[in-house]
Image: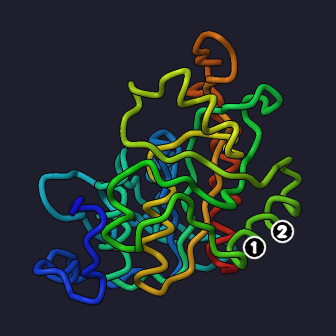
Amino acid sequence: MDPLHEDDLAEPGVLDPSLHARRARLPEAAVLCFFPEVVAGFVEAGARRLTRLSSERESVVWEIEVDGRPVAVVHPGIGAPLAAMTLEELIAMGARRVVAVGGAGVLVPDLVMGHAVVVGSALRDEGTSAHYLLPGRVVDADPYGVEVLQRTLDAAGLPHVTGRTWTTDAVYRETRARVERRRAEGCVTVDMEASAFIAVARFRGVRFAQVLLAADSLAGPEWDARGWTTARSARAGLTSAAARAALDL
């Protein structure tokens, strides 16, 4: 049997995240922020250091205040396995309402750079989610999380759409044929973590939502970076909205 189709979801893992999570107790609201300069900006503005995550990572969890309320912020690392590991440890330390915010490649030409995309569902082209959910092609996001993000983005005046993202482990194997197939299946973006995040949150019973910044483009015949890493105002604004959504989840 294919290992990704083995069903032992009811059995606990030999390693429990609580064994590796630090003793720090985190705020219930947390943001997984993929924008390093935004996290650095929080630190420069006086964010409080809460803890460092396990293993050989130098991922520090910081605490910021939004409207006088605490929110934990951390860069989760790139790719489904590491990002899922980060989410697991945040949950073990007390996070219960989590919003992820980061960039994603766009698969459709009408998504302009900087537009916000609320993840409504994710196509599971990665291996991590199979260890949290039974096999399936698509996983739906928590409808309540989607609603909260939509409402928060509306209040912030940030244009947004809600759609399906294609989550893949192999950024350099996004072939043209596969892009076309994913677009035909309704995917508007491509990322590396969303389906795993949804699976972990569902397995652990916590609230989760994700918003993506429309970044580089795979919609045309050639890849177009579109200078998305320089869109610092959009990245910061989307992170602020994510923090408020985490408080409201």
Residue, x 36% and y 44% (percent of image)?
78
User: In the image, what residue type sits under mark 1?
Assistant: Val
**As drawn, 103 above or below 218:** below
Q: Which residue is mark 2?
A: 151
**As drawn, 79 above or below 174:** below
Residue 148, label in figure = 1
Residue, x 36% and y 73% (percent of image)?
132
**As drawn, 40 above or below 230:** below
- 182 left or right of 144 in image: left
Q: Position of residue 29 (x, y in %)?
A: 54, 77
Q: Are marks 1 and 2 in contact (CB under 8 Å)?
A: yes
Residue, x 69% and y 74% (percent of image)?
67
User: In the image, what residue type sits under mark 2?
Assistant: Arg
* Residue 70 seen in the current view: no
Residue, x 77% and y 39% (percent of image)?
115
In space, the residues marked 1 and 2 are separated at their CA atoms by 5 Å
Q: Residue furthest top?
A: 222
Q: Could you say which quadrant of the image residue 82 lies in?
A: bottom left
Give the position of the N terminus as an image quadrant: bottom left
Mark 1 Cα-neighbour bin, 10 Å: few <14, some 14–19, many ≥20: some
Q: Please name whichever residue, 143 or 138, is drawn nearer the observer in this view of the structure.
A: 138
Q: Position of residue 47 (x, y in %)?
A: 46, 61
Q: Position of residue 66 (x, y in %)?
A: 64, 70
Q: Please name whichever residue, 219 or 242, is drawn nearer the observer in this view of the structure.
A: 219
Q: Position of residue 173 (x, y in %)?
A: 40, 27
Give the position of the C terminus as an image quadrant: bottom right
**As drawn, 102 above or below 7:** above
* Residue 230 seen in the current view: yes
Mark 2 Cα-neighbour bin, 10 Å: few <14, some 14–19, many ≥20: some
